[in-house]
Amino acid sequence: MQFRKALMARAKKLGCDRDLQQIFDKFDAALKKCKNDTEIRHIQVVGAAEVHKLFGCRGGLVVNGWTIIPAEPGYEEASDSKIIKI
């Protein structure tokens, strides 16, 4: 829940908090219907990708070593980056 609060605080600063809440609602509903761990993980990854795009992230989205969304061309990560591992 703390992670969601942090995401929502960021969304409010960006002016997209309603969009983020819709993403949360959509994926919470989908996760309630899941029965197996693989499907749950796939839904979580798709949700993370939607949040990544909503926030206008330019860096890549990597989950468990898999590149879900590659970084934009020319993007260089700062050495003091605070990447969240998911």
Image (cartoon, rainbow, N blue to C red):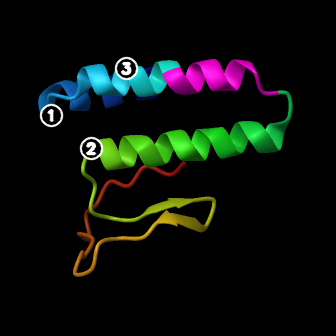
Left or right: residue 61 versus residue 5 is right
Hey, what amino acid is under mark 2? Answer: Phe
The range drawn in magenta is: 26-34
Residue 14 got which mark?
1
Q: Please name the residue shown 34% across and 27% down the image.
A: 20
Q: Against 71, is 28 above or below? A: above
Q: Which residue is mark 2?
A: 55
Give the residue number, with chain letter if any, for mark 3: 21
Q: Are marks 1 and 2 in contact (CB under 8 Å)?
A: yes
Q: Position of residue 72 (x, y in %)?
A: 29, 72
Check disc 2 and report its element: helix, strand or loop: loop
Most common SS among magenta residues: helix
Residue type for callout 3: Gln
Res 32 → quadrant: top right
> Which residue is rendered at x = 65% and y = 25% of the image?
30
The foreground one among 43 and 79 is 43
- Disc number for residue 47: none
List x then y, in percent, for residue 49: 46, 48
Q: Residue at x 70, y 43 (%)?
A: 41
Give left or right: position of 54 versus 67.
Answer: left
Q: Magenta segment: does it hold 29?
A: yes
Distance (Cα) linking label 1 and label 2:
8 Å
Q: Could you tell me the amino acid type at mark 1?
A: Leu
